[in-house]
């Protein structure tokens, strides 16, 4: 069973905000910043919210 602390919840909220911002920027036509936000969200913040 995973034991989620306050730090995990903060990383989860940050990952949701970063991923949502990436998709919003992608919908507006940004082809430089949006992929960076999506990669950071999925490959950095989501694993941090699970592991830390």
Image (spheres, rainbow, N blue to C red):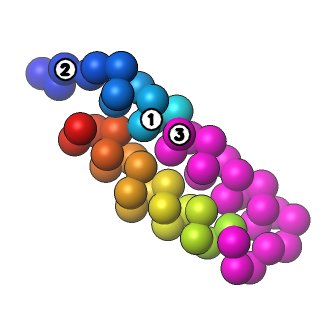
Q: Which residue, given by chain and number where applicable, does mark 2 sit on?
A: 3
Estimate the x, y position of residue 30 in percent, counting from the top left: 79, 73
Q: Residue at x 36, y 20 (%)?
A: 6
Q: Residue at x 31, y 49 (%)?
A: 47
The answer to which quarter of the image holds residue 33 is bottom right
Q: Is residue 24 magenta?
A: yes
Residue furthest out toward the bottom: 32
**Callout 1 crowding tier (Cα within 10 Å): few <14, some 14–19, many ≥20:** some
| Cβ atoms at labels 1 and 3 below 8 Å apart | yes
Q: How many numbered dots are placed on residues in this image?
A: 3
Residue furthest out toward the right: 28
Q: Tell me how far mark 2 sits from mark 3, CA to CA.
A: 19 Å
Q: Which residue, given by chain and number where applicable, does mark 3 sit on?
A: 14
Magenta range is 14-33
Q: Secondary structure at mark 1?
A: helix
Horizontal side, residue 10 vs residue 18: left or right: left
Q: Which residue, given by chain and number where applicable, does mark 1 sit on?
A: 12
For the C terminus, which image quadrant? top left
- Which is more toward the observer, 7 or 24? 7
| Cβ atoms at labels 2 and 1 below 8 Å apart | no
Estimate the x, y position of residue 29 in percent, counting from the top left: 84, 73
């Amino acid at each position: 069973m995973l034991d989620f602390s306050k730090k995990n919840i903060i990383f989860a909220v940050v990952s949701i905000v970063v991923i949502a911002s990436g998709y919003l920027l992608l919908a507006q036509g940004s082809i430089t910043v949006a992929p960076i936000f999506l990669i950071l969200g999925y490959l950095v913040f989501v694993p941090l919210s699970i592991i830390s």
